[in-house]
Amino acid sequence: MKKRERIERSIAGEQTDRVPVALWRYWPGDDQRAADLAQAVLAFQENYDWDFINVMPSNTFLVMDYGIQDQWNGDLEGTRECQRAIINRSLDWTDLRALDPYRGALSRHLESLRLIESGLNDKDTPIIQTIFNPLAQAQLIAGNKILLRHMRTNPDRVHTGLNTLTETTLRFIESLKRMDIDGIFYVTPHADYDMMSVEEYQAFGLPYDHKILDSLPSRWWLNVLNVGGEAPMFKLVDGFNVHIINWQDQHAEPDLSRGKSLVRGAVAGGLSPLTHILKGTPASVREAAREAIHQTNGRRLLLSAGAPIYISTPLSNIHAVREAVNVAGV
């Protein structure tokens, strides 16, 4: 069974030859150069033959050209930290201007995608692109403390900034529509009760999320939503234009089985990037994979982790994830 058919049948709850599987990660250092990022992504795919590729540039790529200063400080997930925010006064939100996707960091990433497309040996492998939502971008350019303060003291100015960030994101998506990809991996870290209230997310998150997700072309058949942290606002995002929902099901409610009952498409998860894939053994990884498949009866499930895997993850554990779905009867 080809990969697209396997995933589409899984999303629909139909019988497949096996459960689809994919992991993804950041590539610190390599994510600063188009060719290096492409080479890293292609090697990861060649080594493990995932059912789709989630291309993850640096977590700052959508906002780098606003003038932030960032660097990788050794974070084991591979994310970069902003050394200098560009939002200090509330008026700074109104100074933002939408970026051109064919210049700077955005253009560099489009080149990475072109290199990945052309270098991929198995042309049947679906490709999706990670996109951080406007609220996540706002946190990067302001810092969480300043973002929350301005949301509560000067909300109109924050909305002006969020509209600009949304416009940049829509322009980038327009450029993606000219490429041979199959969807996006849309990250909503603030849809989390530990981050903000429901009312705040309804005001500062949902309108912009809907604007972006509603703009996606119908031919993109593999849009994946990543929700929140350890306390996701699961019910708020059920109406989004996505096919698969991914969250930290091993550390947050709902669990995998309950989450599957709450969504129309499929769920991606079953494994903890920390407990199972980083700290576990191949045997414990295989056991966790079997449990996830058992919980869902192997239907409407894509075996994965609730977050990017750590860059120091043992290769034997990554192989164990890939091999777990090949067990007879799975």
Image (cartoon, rainbow, N blue to C red):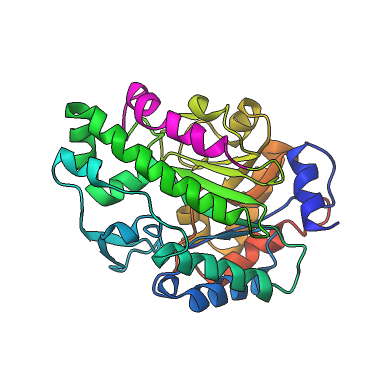
Question: Which quadrant would residue 117 be assigned to in this image?
Answer: bottom right
- Report if residue 232 is visible in the image: no
Residue at x 52% of width, y 30% of height: 237
Residue at x 63% of width, y 57% of height: 178
Name the image quarter holding the N terminus: bottom right
Which residue lies most toward the left here? 89
84 w.r.t. 228: above or below: below
Q: Is residue 289 magenta?
A: no
Which residue lies most toward the top here? 199
Q: Position of residue 236 (x, y in %)?
A: 49, 25
- Report if residue 230 is visible in the image: yes
124 w.r.t. 37: above or below: above
Q: Position of residue 242 (x, y in %)?
A: 62, 38
142 w.r.t. 52: above or below: above
105 w.r.t. 36: above or below: above
Residue 296 is left or right of residue 328, and the answer is left
Residue at x 50% of width, y 34% of height: 211
Which residue is at the front of the view, 79 or 184? 184
User: What range of the chain is rendered magenta?
Assistant: 195-216
Q: Is residue 199 magenta?
A: yes
Q: Position of residue 142 (x, y in %)?
A: 23, 47
Question: Which quadrant would residue 261 be assigned to in this image?
Answer: top right
Which residue is at the front of the view, 52 or 180? 180
Which residue is at the front of the view, 92 or 247? 92
Q: Position of residue 296 (x, y in %)?
A: 70, 37
Count of labels in the image? 0
Residue at x 33% of width, y 60% of height: 64
Determine the main secondary structure of the stretch shown in magenta. helix
